Image (cartoon, rainbow, N blue to C red):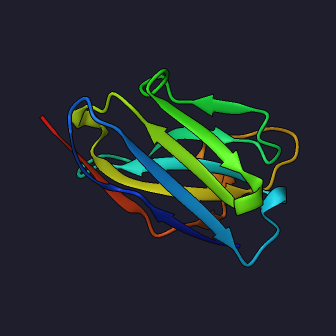
Amino acid sequence: VQLLESGGGLVQAGGSLRLSCVASRGPFSIYNIGWFRKAPGKEREFVAAISRSGSSTIYADSVLGRLTIQSDAAKNTVFLQMNSLIPEDTAVYYCAAGIDWRTIHSTSSQYPYWGQGTQVTVSS
């Protein structure tokens, strides 16, 4: 599977963005999809993930209530709706695909397929 992120950009604090992750060259329906981010000088961290059925989601505590992950199987796309953005959300955001039909994961090692990333910058 190949993954392509889009939707990043520059936004003021308190603003919103919607990131998209489009999957190609693979059966989208078998993959769990996760979003991760990496800020300069920091380790890559988990943001959110959604099960292949779209029925289960998990979030990092730092984004709970502000970011929402959703899937549209007909479009082979997973979205990350980002509201009430803060400067600490500034990072390169990556989507990743994993295959574990038992559960969805927050650890990057469970996701073998990654996109190239999209930059999100939140100004204060």
68 relative to 99 in the view: left or right: left
* Residue farthest to the bottom, as pictured: 25
Q: Is residue 48 left or right of residue 86?
A: right
Residue found at x 71% / y 73%: 1
In the rendered image, is residue 98 in sight? yes
Looking at the rendered structure, the number of numbered marks drawn on it comes to 0
* Image position, residue 99 (x, y; %): 79, 55
Q: Position of residue 56 (x, y in %)?
A: 75, 32
Residue occupying image coordinates x 30% and y 33%: 85
Q: Quadrant of the C terminus?
A: top left
Instruction: Name the outermost residue toward the left.
Output: 124
Q: Position of residue 20 (x, y in %)?
A: 52, 56
In the displayed structure, 49 sits above or below 85; it is below
Residue 44 visible, this orientation: no
Taking the view exactly as shown, the residue that stands out farthest to the right is 101
On screen, 40 above or below 104?
A: below
Query: Residue 43: x and y, percent?
Result: 37, 47
**Residue 30, picture quadrant:** bottom right
Left or right, 77 with reference to 99: left
Name which quarter of the figure residue 31 lies in.
Answer: bottom right
Q: Residue furthest front?
A: 74
- At 62% across and 52% down in the image, what residue appears? 78
